[in-house]
Image (cartoon, rainbow, N blue to C red):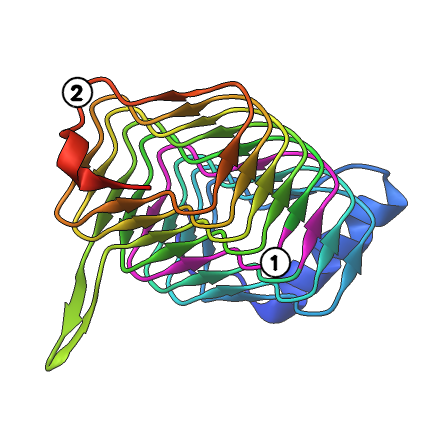
Amino acid sequence: MDSRPITKEEIEAELEKSTIEHRDANFSGLTLQFLSLAERQLNYGINLKDSTVIGNVFLADTVVNGNLDMENAAVSGSLFLGRGKIMGNLNLRNAAAGQNINLVGINITGNLVLERAKVFGFVSLAKAVVLGMIDARNIEIKNFAKGELTVRGDLYVKSAQINGSFDLSDAVLSGMVSLENALIRKNLILKNISTKDNIFLRNSIVQEGTITDGVPPDKIIR
């Protein structure tokens, strides 16, 4: 099996072919040096399931007209999907990121799945809009350290809008959780979440209730 990273030209060729054939671009199981598709309008979804990305994934201000599937993907660098739009689901179940996952200001018309994802560095959903639910059960967010630099394993959901439930059951974080000014139209589930720091809920609105079973009350700052 050819394990070499596919080239930028091969990536572009598959994107063009997928448009012609009216299907998702398929990079499943492949190795990519990096994926940079900033400020693009993609006609269909992207399948990166079981893929390996040696560098970064950079989709700033990109519109994906379909699902972005990164289940079981391994990204050595960071994922930046800030200010983009996913016209479908963003699936990061069991994905691994060597550095940050930054989804600041993203708009997702479906669901966001982060179940059992492993991240070194922060995860940001600040100002994100998710029209479905967020499943982040068993996510692990750990500090990223390189030389004298340390990026804390924080989860930022400040000023986000989530129309469904947000499930963080059994999540493990090396840092804190910020849900300040967030709007969650269904439930916020924090059952058995483990954080080294606090969970900040100041000025957040959770319309159908917050479940905090197994969380020390002094960890929650309202």
Q: Main secondary structure of the magenta part?
A: loop
Q: Secondary structure at mark 2?
A: loop
Q: In the image, what residue occupies the spot 54% across and 59% down?
A: 104
Q: Which residues are magenta?
A: 84-106
- Camera-side residue: 147 or 104? 104
Three-letter code for the amino acid on which mark 2 is drawn:
Gly
Residue under label 2, please give it.
Answer: 214
- The residue sitting at 42% across, 46% down in the picture is 179
Question: Does residue 62 lie above or below 161 as drawn?
Answer: below
Q: What is the quadrant of residue 192 in the picture?
A: top left
Quarter that holds the C terminus? top left
Residue closer to the observer: 57 or 149: 149
Give the percent coordinates (x, y) of residue 91. 52, 35
Judging by the rendered image, the residue that carries numbered circle 1 is 105
Q: Is residue 12 left or right of residue 207?
A: right
Q: Position of residue 60 (x, y in %)?
A: 62, 67
